Image (spheres, rainbow, N blue to C red):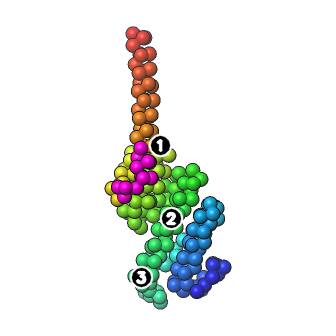
Amino acid sequence: MASVEDARSSKLTPEERVELAKALKERGNDYFKKQEYREAMKNYHKALLHVKGLIDQPKFPGIVLSDEISDELKNCIHQIQFSCYNNLAACLSKDGRWDRSEHYCSEALKLKPYNAKALFRRGQSYLYMKDFDKAERDLKAAEKLEPKDSSIKKMLTLLEVELKRVKEKEKKIYAGMFDTHSEKE
């Protein structure tokens, strides 16, 4: 198996690249547990770079790739990609970078559309970006998948509070508009 330090070697087999990506992902997880989110993100990005292009290699007419990727290896690659995207989203949400968190959740959901954790994180990101319709859609989808998850329930409650606050604010604005208009007449 190639070591994590072999990261720049372009001569690795697909299997070695996958093993290297796994090691980088695990290193990222270790940094995440220590709340060193920037270091965790660096490792998740490196892991993604090592599996990039292994599955969706460009096909050129008349050129046969010597090493076809097995279904087992493809599944492993997808799992690495999914975990890294989801973990990147978690790191970014810890930093309050909701737009980037949403992006990586969306990438994760391309691989596993019915993953409650990714739907929850993306819903949370939408909520903090004030995109309440999308937040509600994702959080309710996550709740259907994990009806007993207290984090999802808390986020849905927060969404309801935010929606009420916004409606009250709008009500005051519109009331002020109509009061001003009727005074002029």
Amino acid at dot 2: Tyr
In this rendering, does residue 135 appear at all? no
- Looking at the rendered structure, the secondary structure element under dot 3 is helix
- Quadrant of image for the C terminus: top left
| Earlier sequence position, callout 3 versus callout 2 | 3
Task: Please provide percent x and percent y for residue 106.
Answer: 45, 59
Magenta stretch: dominant secondary structure: helix
Amino acid at dot 3: Glu
Task: Please provide percent x and percent y for residue 99.
Answer: 52, 52
| Earlier sequence position, callout 2 versus callout 1 | 2
- Looking at the rendered structure, the secondary structure element under dot 2 is helix
- Quadrant of image for the N terminus: bottom right
Q: Which one is nearer the viewer's eye here, 152 or 42?
A: 152
The CA distance from mark 1 to mark 3 is: 41 Å
Residue 175 colored in magenta in the image: no
Q: Name the residue under label 3.
A: 72
Residue 155 colored in magenta in the image: yes
Q: Mark 1 points at which residue?
A: 130
Q: Name the residue under label 2.
A: 85
Amino acid at dot 1: Lys
